[in-house]
Image (tube, grey):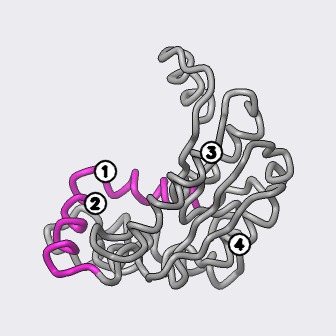
Amino acid sequence: MGQRFGTVVDTLGIERFPLLGVSQGGAISIAYAARHPERLSHLILYGGFALGGGKRSPGEREKRKAMGTLMRLGWGMDDPAFRQMFTSQFIPEATKDQADWFNDLQRKTTSPECAARYFEVVGNLDVREMLPQVQVPTLVMHVRDDLMVPIEAGRQMAAGIPHARFIALPGKNHLFLKHEPATARFFDEINLFLTK
């Protein structure tokens, strides 16, 4: 994945740029930052983790295994009950219309097998050894009551990156919604960070 990202950057002719990694994209961004510090001006991580959920605890591993089985069996069904389980973790404060939209988006964007395989791969990510190698200015943000990725995973990630700044945002939604307080704060913090 990191090689493909580097190819895109090279093709576009971008010399230095800020990189935003969201959720599992945080681990990919950490790997890129550790390998290519000369390419980045800033690293911004939101809702991320250095250690995937499948490696955090035996209980979490079993939960993810069960969720993977449910994904394979129910992801592509017209009934959104199986996908709603994920929607409830990503955006627990969504309106019915927002949840319905996200449920439908999940079904349309990937097959059940691909969704389950992706979920498994993400659960096994581990870039903890790369954290001390990140040498670019880094901002880490995480919502306090995130149900998908616990805030402690974000704090641990920030603590492992030299001089990283950690900001806890209000809310429960892993994918925050347009009109909630975390949204404005997220963009304000990014603007401040990039203009320093």
| The residue stretch that appears in magenta | 94-123
Residue 183 relative to residue 3: left or right: left
Residue depicted at 59% across the width and 78% down the height:
150
Q: Are marks 1 and 2 in contact (CB under 8 Å)?
A: yes
Q: Amino acid at mark 1?
A: Thr
| Mark toward the start of the polypeptide (3 vs 1) | 3
Spatial CA span between label 1 and label 2: 7 Å
Q: CA distance from mark 1 to mark 4?
A: 31 Å
Element type where label 2 sits in the image:
helix
Disc 1 target residue: 110
- Residue 194 higher or lower than 117, as above or below: above
Picture coordinates of residue 13 (x, y %)? 53, 14
Which of pointers 1 and 4 lies earlier in the amino acid sequence? 1
Q: Is residue 122 magenta?
A: yes
Which residue position is annotated with label 2? 106
Looking at the rendered structure, the number of numbered marks drawn on it comes to: 4
* Above or below: residue 140 compared with residue 93: above
Question: Residue under circle 4?
Answer: 155
Residue 54 visible (yes or no): no
Local packing at callout 1 (Cα closer than 10 Å; few below 14, some 14-19, many 20+) is some
Cα–Cα gap, marks 4 and 2: 28 Å
| Residue 10 in the image: above or below residue 42 | above
Residue at 77% from the left image edge and 40% from the top image edge: 34
- Which label lies toward us, 3 or 1? 3
47 on left or right of 106: right
Residue that carries the numbered disc 3 in the rendered image: 29
Mark 3 or mark 2: name the one nearer the start of the chain.
3
